[in-house]
Amino acid sequence: MRQKIIIDTDPGQDDAVAILLALASPELEVLGITAVAGNVPLHLTEKNARVICELAGRRDMAVFAGCDRPMNRPLVTAEHVHGKTGLDGPVLPDPTMALQDRHAVDFIIETLRSHPAGSVTLCPLGPLTNIATALLRAPDIAARVQRIVLMGGAYFEVGNITPAAEFNIHVDPHAADIVFKSGISLVVMPLDVTHKALVTAERNAAFRAIGSPAAIAVAQMTDFFERFDKAKYGSAGAPLHDPCVTAFLLAPDLFTGRHINVEIETTSDLTMGMTVADWWGVTDRAPNALFMGDLDAPGFFTLLTERLARL
Ligand code: BDR
Ligand code: CA
């Protein structure tokens, strides 16, 4: 049976690749795509989500706009990484497919209530504002979510937007705190894993060689996106953070991790949004997340390249 998923996202080049991988994969039934403010403001993330659906030939996909700012803090964006549009790199046409009228949070709540309990997976690729708002507004949905597979946080890599925090969690730590305390089964793709999903020159060439508009756009997006991490970390190419979420749904054996306790820092200015991950089991706090630590990178890129060729 196909896995039913909702992708909650702030595209973002790596979000775009995560969405394309999902839309290329028959094992997944994408019930809808919900946009949130994050890498760039909401009016751009919802537009970018539609741009990507059209690139995948999926004008029929339902795209919803959600929360335009974090729950308790001003929005922090990442144009310095993703460019002014959030999708800098390829020149892609403005979307002509419509944005849905319903608010993303209403869509999430109604979808979870109208499907059998335990049959829908949430896949957050950005700040957790939409998900936490839905959980606050409709606490009954927590018991209906199959699981949440998200990109966010870090342990060994510590932080990318501050010395202590990863971007998605830092932008809305209060939302993250709600999600991590929700009791829902969580799978977390932290920077420790996503910094191993690097688009080397060879991997980029493999995308480009597919020759389709979607694959060429992915090569151009990762070309653009890599300059930041190359300059900052001296890494071999762009890290495909968010596609780790989609790849996990398709091939969980590519990843290894530990079922541990993860708490979110919400009070200290210095470490706001830090994921305090008990990787070494030094507390007796109950495990609440499968926190990934390693990735089979060649296997990940084989899967991604093979799927992109189907679009
Ligand atoms: C996360 O932040 C965003 O910039 C990326 O899209 C990814 O979701 C990585 O920290
Ligand atoms: Ca993202």
Image: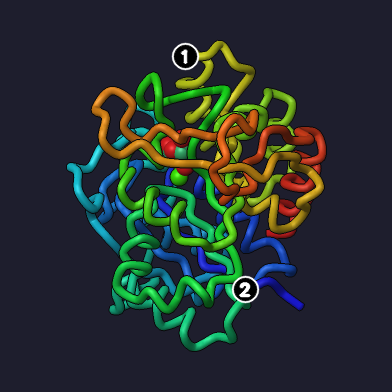
Q: Which dot marks residue 232?
A: 1
**Residue 99 appears at what percent x and percent y?**
33, 71
**Residue 238 appears at what percent x and percent y?**
57, 28
Q: Amino acid at mark 1?
A: Lys
Q: Is residue 297 above or below residue 60?
A: above
Q: Is residue 202 left or right of residue 41?
A: right
Say which quadrant the N terminus sits in. Answer: bottom right
Q: Residue furthest front?
A: 284
Q: CA distance from mark 2 to mark 1?
A: 37 Å
Residue under the point 55% across and 85% down = 115
Q: Nearer the viewer, residue 268 or 127?
A: 268
Q: Amino acid at mark 2?
A: Lys
Say which quadrant the C terminus sits in. Answer: bottom right
Q: By what rule are the colours in the image chosen?
A: rainbow
Q: Helix, strand or loop at disc 2?
A: strand
**Residue 21 appears at what percent x and percent y?**
64, 54
For disc 1, does the CB lie below 8 Å from ligand 1? no
Residue 217 seen in the figure: no
Q: Is residue 138 left or right of residue 159?
A: left
Task: Tell whether label 1 touches label 2 (CB within 8 Å).
Answer: no
Q: Which residue is mark 2?
A: 4
Residue under the point 55% across and 31% down = 191
Tell me the quarter of the picture where residue 40 sits: top left
Structural crowding at the residue carrying mark 1, measured as other residues with C-alpha within 10 Å and reported as few (<14), some (14–19) or many (≥20):
few
Residue under the point 30% across and 78% down = 102
Q: Is residue 194 above or below residue 140?
A: above
Q: Nearer the viewer, residue 5 or 42?
A: 5
Residue under the point 33% across and 26% down = 271
Question: Which of the four quarters of the rendered structure image does ligand 1 lie in?
Answer: top left
